[in-house]
Amino acid sequence: MNFENILFEKKGAIAYVTINRPKVLNALNMATMEELRAAFHDIKNDPAIRVVIMTGAGEKAFIAGADISELAKHDAVSGKEYTHRGQSVLNLIENFGKPVIACINGFALGGGCEIAMACTMRLASENAKLGQPEVKLGIIPGYGGTQRLPRLVGKGIAMQLVLAGEMISAQEAHRIGLVNEVVPAAELIPRAEAIAQKIIANAPLAIQYAMEAVNKGMEMTLAEGLYLEAVLFAVACSSEDKKEGTTAFLEKRTPQFKGK
């Protein structure tokens, strides 16, 4: 697939996905969402890729929100389809089986904040601004903002952000737990790459199962989540990687994981 709205490249075990519409601050339209879907399906089917780093082109925005000119055309029927299509892309990112690191290099508003929340972890540059301002347009968040935000920061803070529609700084986003770290802009991608390399050194199946346990467990009771954890732990115990990892530890050498 030829991409017009994103940049997509692979370097070693890392895939880089960059929203590339800087003239409109990387605003999301459906064409961009479908390109993201295609890119992530490509990565999912490539066993050589272990981690994804996602960011926005330019120095002003990660993703500044939806393309309002496209959004303005929707009625109830088309709006519901629009939302479901977008949600399916974010669900793909969240339940990807490979970590996705969002590098928030500026504005992450509306759908941009929602995409960041669907990622496995979020790093922000010092100049980043985040928010869910949809109520200012007479709508509500439609790509998971009403669901993922309270799960990340708690109901009260999520309500304040969604209902007031205000932007917050990267530092405030870090304080409330919306982003993992705040770093200088020049260090954003290098920091993500450093985290990625630590992940890549670990067992691929263990990474996949751990992510599944956390993501699915968040939707369960504690008892159900503990049962899921036990099942996935048992599955991991049957892998070649578990044998290699424990053997390498006992032999005091670096493990050579194969994802099997």
Image (cartoon, grey):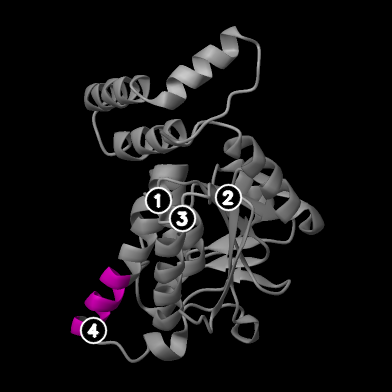
For the C terminus, the quadrant is top left
Asked which secondary structure carries label 1, the reply is loop
Image quadrant where residue 225 sits: top left
Q: CA distance from mark 1 to mark 3?
A: 12 Å
Q: Amino acid at mark 3?
A: Asp
**Tag of residue 46:** 3
Badge nearest the viewer, 4 or 1: 1
At x 50%, y 82%, the residue is: 2
Dot 2, how many residues are within 10 Å of its Cα: few (below 14), some (14-19), or many (20+)? many
**Tag of residue 96:** 1
Q: CA distance from mark 4 to mark 1?
A: 27 Å
Q: Which residue is mark 2?
A: 122
**Tag of residue 71:** none
Badge nearest the viewer, 3 or 2: 3
Q: CA distance from mark 3 to mark 4?
A: 34 Å
Q: Is residue 80 magenta?
A: yes
Place of residue 99 in the rendered image (x, y in percent of width and height, measured from the top left): 50, 46
- Which of the two discs, 1 and 3, labels the residue nearer the N terminus? 3
Q: Amino acid at mark 2?
A: Arg
Q: Residue furthest left?
A: 77
Q: Nearer the viewer, residue 35 or 49?
A: 49
At x 60%, y 43%, the residue is: 180
Q: What residue span does the magenta drawing correspond to?
A: 77-85
Q: What's the magenta bit mostly, secondary-structure-wise?
A: helix
**Tag of residue 78:** 4
